[in-house]
Image (cartoon, grey):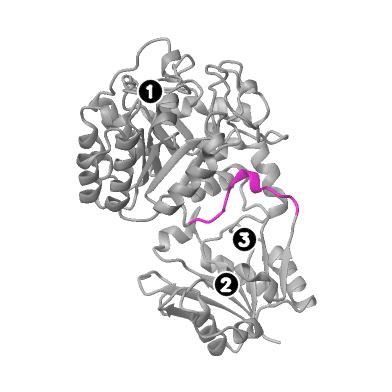
């Protein structure tokens, strides 16, 4: 029986993405896998765009397509293998003993496909049998990766699901160096421990050294302005101690320049207490941030009143897949709109939404959002039916009471029973319109702000937040703001 290993280089990766702490990951993986004594050979596959040091080396092949059925049929034909273990070439923490154990399970139970759901990406593999690939038609027209084909038709194949303790899925880590943020985290762990830890060790190492995770802001909510023309019953703006004005362009620029220091991808969201489209320099500021190569997504949360032809024309001309527009519409008709938003602009917002559907570049660039509260529950089914017919995806949003600042209107509480460390303190940053960096999104008035961009760098302010994050991770919940009263710790953003 011939069993081979395949190191898969994903599209867009270069040798820099395959190097961690001075080590070229594919070379290390090849040696470790051959040392197990279970693989006849280790192959490497890369797209034609890859031009790194592996080109021309033994067992290297250039692929012209994704890892779909046609790709696997060719690979099994060329290697003459009976089984192939698929691993990603940017997996520096890959645990050879887990691979060996997975292969043992795969062969012992005569599986056609073996994979794990609880192991994080970068620590395990997928095992594919020749018989599985032979049984599939040449092409079903979808060109889906083989693993997606199997998982979506799992009862048609002999599949083994591999489980290994500990289960650290709540940490939401992937251990793939192709992601700059994950690479930074792994380099921090290596720096702290002096080694690449096995899977049995990684959970405890992170729990003892959570500072390794705090590498830079990933999701930033920016309050461009505190002004708004609506008077929604669920809004916290009326409860603020003072009015929030417009963010100055120099503060916005200081924020964007500060993000460049971390050299990590990030997502921005225009949110806070006001309507971002009311900012006098909205289009100039938005055009500015769309020029940033590190920007992954720009989410614009709007009430839709000003999202008319000017806005539609802007997003149409920007033609940027990174733009995401979320229109908050908590109504099904004019009467429910007036009751929840303080005045009736239902037809106007509805018309703007439908026009945006045509202006934005893709199906995942426009959403309509509704709060899951007592007032919307009676018409929620009709709301879903209406927007599904319109082809606009729906976001059902949990109400945030901001630590009891506003009335709790929820008709159900889905908070988990067991608390885990706060995802927002690890990766999020909430920027008030005057440039202050709040403790978190619950600190909407900045009472516990870390400082201000007016006289400190984003790097310095982020480093200030690390102590609070580490304390929370180890169970020491802050009292100001009162983290013990918060039920947002389990929610997460992009």
Q: Which residue is mark 2?
A: 149
Q: Which label belongs to residue 432?
A: 1
Q: Is 408 inside the magenta-drawn segment?
A: no
Q: In percent of the image, x 56 and y 60: which residue is there?
A: 91
Between circles 1 and 2, the one closer to the viewer is 2
x, y percent for residue 274 = 35, 25
x, y percent for residue 332 = 44, 37
The reply to whether dot 3 and dot 1 touch (C-beta < 8 Å) is: no
Q: Which residue is mark 3?
A: 94
Q: In percent of the image, x 33 and y 53: which residue is there?
A: 321
The reply to whether dot 2 and dot 3 touch (C-beta < 8 Å) is: no
Q: Secondary structure at mark 2?
A: helix
Residue stretch rendered in magenta on the structure: 165-177
Q: Please tell me whether residue 69 is drawn above or below residue 87 in the rendered image.
A: below
Res 41 → quadrant:
bottom right
- Left or right, 244 with reference to 103: left
């Amino acid at each position: 029986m011939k069993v081979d290993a395949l190191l898969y280089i994903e599209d867009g990766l270069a040798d820099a993405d395959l190097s961690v702490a001075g080590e070229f990951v594919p070379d290390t993986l090849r040696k470790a896998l051959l040392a197990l004594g279970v693989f006849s050979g280790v192959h490497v596959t890369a797209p034609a765009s890859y031009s790194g040091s592996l080109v021309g080396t033994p067992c290297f092949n250039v692929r012209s397509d994704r890892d779909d059925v046609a790709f696997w049929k060719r690979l099994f034909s060329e290697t003459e293998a009976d089984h192939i273990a698929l691993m990603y070439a940017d997996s520096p923490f890959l645990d050879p003993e887990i691979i060996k154990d997975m292969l043992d399970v795969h062969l012992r139970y005569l599986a056609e496909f073996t994979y794990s759901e609880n192991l994080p990406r970068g620590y395990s593999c997928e095992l594919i049998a020749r018989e599985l690939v032979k049984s599939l038609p040449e092409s079903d027209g979808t060109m889906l990766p083989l693993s997606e084909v199997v998982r979506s038709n799992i009862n048609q194949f002999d599949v083994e699901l591999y489980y290994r303790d500990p289960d650290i899925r709540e940490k939401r880590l992937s251990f793939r160096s192709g992601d700059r943020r994950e690479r930074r985290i792994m380099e921090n762990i290596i720096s702290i421990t002096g080694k690449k830890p096995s899977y049995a060790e990684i959970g405890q190492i992170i729990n003892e050294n959570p500072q390794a995770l705090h590498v830079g802001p990933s999701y930033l909510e920016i309050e461009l302005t505190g002004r708004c023309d609506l008077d929604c019953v669920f809004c916290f703006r009326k409860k603020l101690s003072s009015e929030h004005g417009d963010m100055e362009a120099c503060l916005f620029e200081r924020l964007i320049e500060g993000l460049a220091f971390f050299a990590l991808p990030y997502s921005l969201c225009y949110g806070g207490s006001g309507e971002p489209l009311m900012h006098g320099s909205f289009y100039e500021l938005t055009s500015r941030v769309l020029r940033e190569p590190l920007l992954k997504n720009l989410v614009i949360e709007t009430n839709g009143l000003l999202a008319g032809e000017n806005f539609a024309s802007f997003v149409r001309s920007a033609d940027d897949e990174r733009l995401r527009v979320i229109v908050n519409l908590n109504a099904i008709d004019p009467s429910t709109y007036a009751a929840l938003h303080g005045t009736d602009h239902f037809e106007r917002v509805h018309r703007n939404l439908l026009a945006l559907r045509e202006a934005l570049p893709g199906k995942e660039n426009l959403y309509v959002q509704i709060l899951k509260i007592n007032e919307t529950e009676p018409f929620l089914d009709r709301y879903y039916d209406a927007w599904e017919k319109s082809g606009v995806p729906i976001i059902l949003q949990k109400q945030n009471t901001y630590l009891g600042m506003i009335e709790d209107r929820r008709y159900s509480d889905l908070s988990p029973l067991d608390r885990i460390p706060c995802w927002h303190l690890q990766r999020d940053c909430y920027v008030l319109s005057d440039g202050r960096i709040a403790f978190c999104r619950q600190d909407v008035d900045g009472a516990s702000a870390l400082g201000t961009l007016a006289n400190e760098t984003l790097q310095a302010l982020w480093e200030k937040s690390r102590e609070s994050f580490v304390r929370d991770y180890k169970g020491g919940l802050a009292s100001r703001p009162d983290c013990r009263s918060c039920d947002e710790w389990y929610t997460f953003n992009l």
